[in-house]
Amino acid sequence: MIAEGKVKREDLFVTTKIEANFHFRTKVLEGIKISLANLGLKYVDLLLIHKPGENNVGTWQGMEDVKELGLAKSIGISTFDEKLTDEILHMAKIKPTVNQV
Protein backbone atom coordinates (compact mmCIF):
# COMPACT_ATOMS: atom_id res chain seq x y z
CA MET A 1 0.00 0.00 0.00
CA ILE A 2 2.87 2.37 0.76
CA ALA A 3 4.69 1.48 -2.46
CA GLU A 4 1.47 2.00 -4.43
CA GLY A 5 1.02 5.45 -2.87
CA LYS A 6 -2.30 4.52 -1.26
CA VAL A 7 -0.96 5.02 2.26
CA LYS A 8 1.78 7.32 3.54
CA ARG A 9 4.31 5.72 5.89
CA GLU A 10 4.01 8.65 8.27
CA ASP A 11 0.27 7.90 8.63
CA LEU A 12 1.02 4.48 10.13
CA PHE A 13 2.26 3.59 13.61
CA VAL A 14 4.25 0.37 13.43
CA THR A 15 5.43 -1.53 16.52
CA THR A 16 7.63 -4.60 16.66
CA LYS A 17 9.54 -6.46 19.34
CA ILE A 18 13.05 -7.79 19.84
CA GLU A 19 12.77 -11.52 20.47
CA ALA A 20 14.66 -13.32 23.25
CA ASN A 21 17.39 -14.70 20.98
CA PHE A 22 18.46 -11.09 20.25
CA HIS A 23 18.55 -9.97 23.92
CA PHE A 24 22.17 -8.83 23.90
CA ARG A 25 23.49 -5.37 23.13
CA THR A 26 25.42 -6.70 20.15
CA LYS A 27 22.40 -8.57 18.76
CA VAL A 28 19.60 -5.96 18.99
CA LEU A 29 20.74 -4.24 15.78
CA GLU A 30 20.65 -7.56 13.94
CA GLY A 31 17.15 -8.23 15.27
CA ILE A 32 15.71 -4.89 14.19
CA LYS A 33 17.30 -5.18 10.75
CA ILE A 34 15.55 -8.53 10.27
CA SER A 35 12.24 -7.04 11.39
CA LEU A 36 12.62 -4.03 9.11
CA ALA A 37 13.43 -6.26 6.14
CA ASN A 38 10.39 -8.43 6.88
CA LEU A 39 8.18 -5.35 7.16
CA GLY A 40 9.71 -3.59 4.16
CA LEU A 41 10.34 -0.46 6.25
CA LYS A 42 13.25 1.83 7.05
CA TYR A 43 12.19 2.40 10.67
CA VAL A 44 9.53 1.45 13.20
CA ASP A 45 7.66 3.85 15.41
CA LEU A 46 8.05 1.71 18.53
CA LEU A 47 10.48 -1.08 19.31
CA LEU A 48 9.90 -3.17 22.44
CA ILE A 49 11.91 -5.72 24.36
CA HIS A 50 9.55 -8.67 23.90
CA LYS A 51 9.79 -9.85 27.50
CA PRO A 52 12.27 -9.64 30.38
CA GLY A 53 15.29 -11.89 30.20
CA GLU A 54 18.67 -12.43 31.79
CA ASN A 55 20.35 -9.51 30.02
CA ASN A 56 17.86 -6.65 30.30
CA VAL A 57 20.50 -3.94 30.80
CA GLY A 58 22.57 -5.01 27.78
CA THR A 59 19.45 -5.38 25.68
CA TRP A 60 18.30 -1.90 26.69
CA GLN A 61 21.68 -0.45 25.71
CA GLY A 62 21.23 -2.08 22.28
CA MET A 63 17.76 -0.55 22.07
CA GLU A 64 19.24 2.87 22.75
CA ASP A 65 21.81 2.26 20.00
CA VAL A 66 19.02 1.39 17.54
CA LYS A 67 17.06 4.53 18.45
CA GLU A 68 20.14 6.70 18.01
CA LEU A 69 20.61 5.17 14.53
CA GLY A 70 17.05 6.21 13.64
CA LEU A 71 15.79 2.66 13.13
CA ALA A 72 13.17 3.13 15.89
CA LYS A 73 11.50 6.42 16.77
CA SER A 74 10.63 5.22 20.29
CA ILE A 75 11.75 2.30 22.46
CA GLY A 76 10.06 0.51 25.31
CA ILE A 77 9.63 -2.61 27.35
CA SER A 78 6.93 -5.26 27.57
CA THR A 79 5.64 -7.07 30.67
CA PHE A 80 8.38 -5.73 32.96
CA ASP A 81 7.45 -5.66 36.64
CA GLU A 82 8.27 -2.73 38.92
CA LYS A 83 11.71 -4.06 39.94
CA LEU A 84 12.81 -4.73 36.36
CA THR A 85 11.44 -1.39 35.18
CA ASP A 86 13.38 0.42 37.92
CA GLU A 87 16.54 -1.43 36.85
CA ILE A 88 16.16 0.02 33.35
CA LEU A 89 15.13 3.49 34.54
CA HIS A 90 18.20 3.82 36.76
CA MET A 91 20.71 3.05 34.01
CA ALA A 92 18.98 4.31 30.85
CA LYS A 93 20.26 7.23 28.82
CA ILE A 94 16.92 7.10 26.99
CA LYS A 95 13.91 6.30 29.17
CA PRO A 96 11.34 3.74 27.95
CA THR A 97 8.41 5.35 26.18
CA VAL A 98 6.06 2.56 27.22
CA ASN A 99 5.76 -0.62 29.29
CA GLN A 100 3.28 -2.74 27.36
CA VAL A 101 1.32 -4.81 29.84
Image: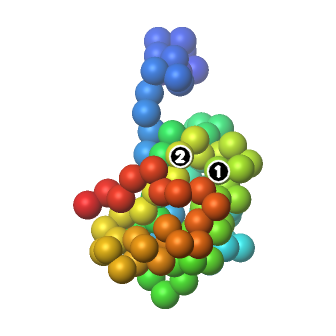
Residue in view at x 62 percent, y 77 percent: 58
Q: Please give the count of numbered marks on the rendered protein.
A: 2
Q: Residues within 10 Å of mark 1 (few under 14, many from 20)?
A: many
- Residue 13 makes an appearance in the image: yes
Quarter assignment of residue 30: bottom right
Type of the residue with mark 1: Lys
Residue in view at x 64 percent, y 61 percent: 93
Q: Please determine whether, in this image, residue 94 is positioned above or below residue 12.
A: below
Quarter assignment of residue 80: bottom left
Q: Which residue is mark 2?
A: 74
Q: Are marks 1 and 2 in contact (CB under 8 Å)?
A: yes
Left or right of 25 on screen, residue 83: left
Q: Please determine whether, in this image, residue 12 is positioned above or below residue 64.
A: above
Q: Which residue is mark 1?
A: 67
Spot the residue most to the bottom.
54
Left or right of 23 on screen, residue 16: left
Left or right of 97 on screen, residue 62: right
Pick whichever, 41 or 58, lies toward us: 58
Quarter assignment of residue 57: bottom right
Which sits earlier in the primary sequence, circle 1 or circle 2?
1
Q: Residues within 10 Å of mark 2 (few under 14, many from 20)?
A: many
Question: Where is the C terminus found, in terms of image quarters?
Answer: bottom left
Secondary structure of the residue carrying tag 2 is strand
Spot the residue most to the front.
90
Q: Please determine whether, in this image, residue 85 is positioned above or below residue 44.
A: below
Residue in view at x 32 percent, y 74 percent: 82
Pick whichever, 21 or 67, lies toward us: 67
